[in-house]
Amino acid sequence: MSEITKKTVPVLTDEIVDDYSAEDFVFVQQNERLTDKVYEATSYLRDVWINFSKNKGAVVGMIIISVIILFAVVGPMVSGFRYDDINLAHQSLPPRIPGLEKIGLFNGFENGVNVYEKKGLMDVYYWFGTDTNGRDLFTRVWEGTRISLSIALIAVTVDIIIGMSYGLISGYFGGKVDMIMQRAVEILNGIPTLILVTLLGMVLPRGMTSIIVALMITGWIGMSRISRAEVLKLKESEYILASRTLGAKNFAIIFKDILPNIFGQLITMAMFSVPSAIFTEAYLSFVGLGIPAPAASLGTLISDGYKSMTVHPFMIISGIIVLALLMLSFNLFADGLRDAFDPNQKH
């Protein structure tokens, strides 16, 4: 038989305790509270606002958007001129602003000559100057901003109503329904916007009508793809399965269970579509397919100013600055919304 070796277990004695002192059992932070910090309960929207306010670029973008909207609303009403008033005696006047002219800014000088004094118009002020037809550019810029913002609002509405619904239905039902709907999207997406608007201009009156119809045909495709991708991620979740088990209808699940959980991402994408819609309108107006004269949009103002840029550069500067600020601020605002609704998306 093999001999079993017995191991001896050390016995704890009071001698071990003698190796420690009372100082070894003193709390490190004995003068501070050791309980957990109690946080105030906040709503989801409040959390979104707190995250959004931490993004300084997004806050600046929101302020710029608010200021531009304010000027677009009140600007044409306080200028004292209509956007289509033609006065050939006041044509091609440079910017002149009361108060600033005394310090040498916007004083009506062009090429070293006071154009207002030369024409005997010392009691007249045009803050942004006038165009070649003597129309007030200040009024026309903010009137054009109204049109551009209106088209942007229509683009967001089309995105949310058509694009969101299309993507939700396509992603949720899947199978043949999804295949047929996505093939239709690919066909529509293959039509260039410029060609589409040109063809619509032959059938419809040129202006906002053709631009709105073009947005309704192809402008919602990006939103539909985003919403479809979000639905594909969520439709197999446990709470969706629970709703089906309890007998909820398909459309109730789509619009009551899935939509509230992805609405933040969809609103963010809708904000990203705003600068795209504004640029599309400006581009179409610049090439002569947008808003017809005498109506003004930022694209038509830039197009008209481009023709006189070498002689009177002030005619194009104001429209370009407002358009650039609009596109930049909406991109900053949308980027802040994306991080606020989903902080995990930060880069």
Image: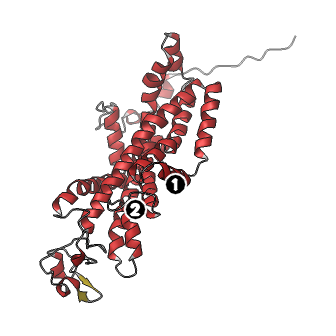
- Could you say where residue 286 lies in the image, as x and y percent from the top left? 44, 64
- Could you say where residue 242 lies in the image, as x and y percent from the top left? 51, 14
Which residue matches tag 2? 299
Task: Name the colour scheme.
Answer: secondary structure
**Taking the image as drawn, is residue 347 in sight?**
no
**Res 65 quadrant in image:** bottom left
Relative placement, left or right, of 236 versus 162 is right
Relative placement, left or right, of 111 versus 188 is left
**Taking the image as drawn, is residue 13 in sight?**
yes
Describe the element under mark 1 as helix, strand or loop.
helix
Q: Is residue 276 above or below residue 342?
A: below
Foreground mark, 2 or 1, reads: 1
Q: Amino acid at mark 1?
A: Thr
- Could you say where residue 263 lies in the image, as x and y percent from the top left? 42, 34
Total number of numbered labels?
2
Which residue matches tag 1? 198
Q: Nearer the viewer, residue 17 or 99?
A: 99
* Residue at the limit of the structure toward the front, as seen here: 203
Q: Is residue 81 above or below residue 100?
A: above
For the point 67% across and 19% down, the residue is 8
Describe the element under mark 2 as helix, strand or loop.
helix
- Could you say where residue 99 lies in the image, as x and y percent from the top left? 14, 75
For the point 63% across and 31% down, the residue is 180
Q: Nearer the viewer, residue 204 or 14?
A: 204
